[in-house]
Image: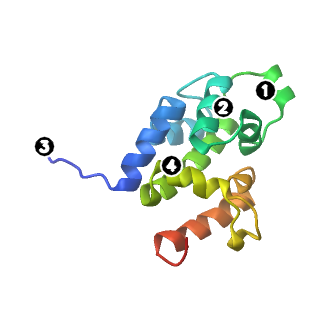
Amino acid sequence: MLNMIQNPFTSTREALFEQVLDTTPNEVIEAVLKQTVVGEPSLEQVLTRLASLLGVSKTDALVVLGISRSRKSKNPDMSVELLDRTYSALTLFARVASILGQEEAKVWFGSPKRMLDGAKPVDLLATRVGVGKLENMLTALEDGTFL
């Protein structure tokens, strides 16, 4: 059988998905498309792990996932929407971590960026527009245009 060589992004992303969601990126994709939930069922666990990964508070992690504290209290389980948002955040984080390393990625996400008009990348994860802007910025980072 032919061994497949994983690039740094793929191996980093796989590890981060296991760390935060207890599942793989491909299983998340399949579940979201089928409107089902996979991996860690507890929103509290996912929040704790995501906050730790990003170097933010759980309150900030709630913002990243686009939910309120009351929503979390009323429904403490993961949903398809939350799984989808977590997928986006983890994939973007993995892109940076595969270039800079996980600890430096945490710093990068938490530091204001001139290219984002002084916003921190972590603050843009809560909206699709923000995620799109980060994706464009990361493509430039991967191409070596800027850090």
Q: Vertically, is 102 above or below 17?
A: below
Residue 120 percent location from the top left of the image:
71, 58
> Secondary structure beneath disc 1?
helix
The residue beneath circle 4 is 103
> Secondary structure beneath disc 3?
loop
Residue 141 in the figure: left or right of residue 3 = right
- Picture disc at residue 101: none
* CA distance separating discs 3 and 1: 46 Å
Instruction: Say which residue appears at 52% left-offset and 70% top-offset.
Output: 141
Rendered image coloring scheme: rainbow
- Picture disc at residue 72: 1
| For marks 4 and 1 on the same chain, the one whose residue lies earlier in the sequence | 1
Residue 88 percent location from the top left of the image:
60, 49
Q: Decide: marks 2, 3 in contact (CB < 8 A)? A: no
Q: Decide: marks 2, 1 in contact (CB < 8 A)? A: yes
Residue 60 percent location from the top left of the image:
75, 41
The residue beneath circle 2 is 47
- Picture disc at residue 1: 3
**Which mark is in front, 3 or 1?**
1
- Amino acid carrying label 1: it is Lys
| For marks 2 and 1 on the same chain, the one whose residue lies earlier in the sequence | 2
- Amino acid carrying label 4: it is Glu
* CA distance separating discs 2 and 4: 18 Å
Residue 24 in the figure: left or right of residue 139 = left
Q: Vertically, is 126 above or below 59?
A: below
**Which mark is in front, 2 or 3?**
2
Q: Decide: marks 2, 4 in contact (CB < 8 A)? A: no
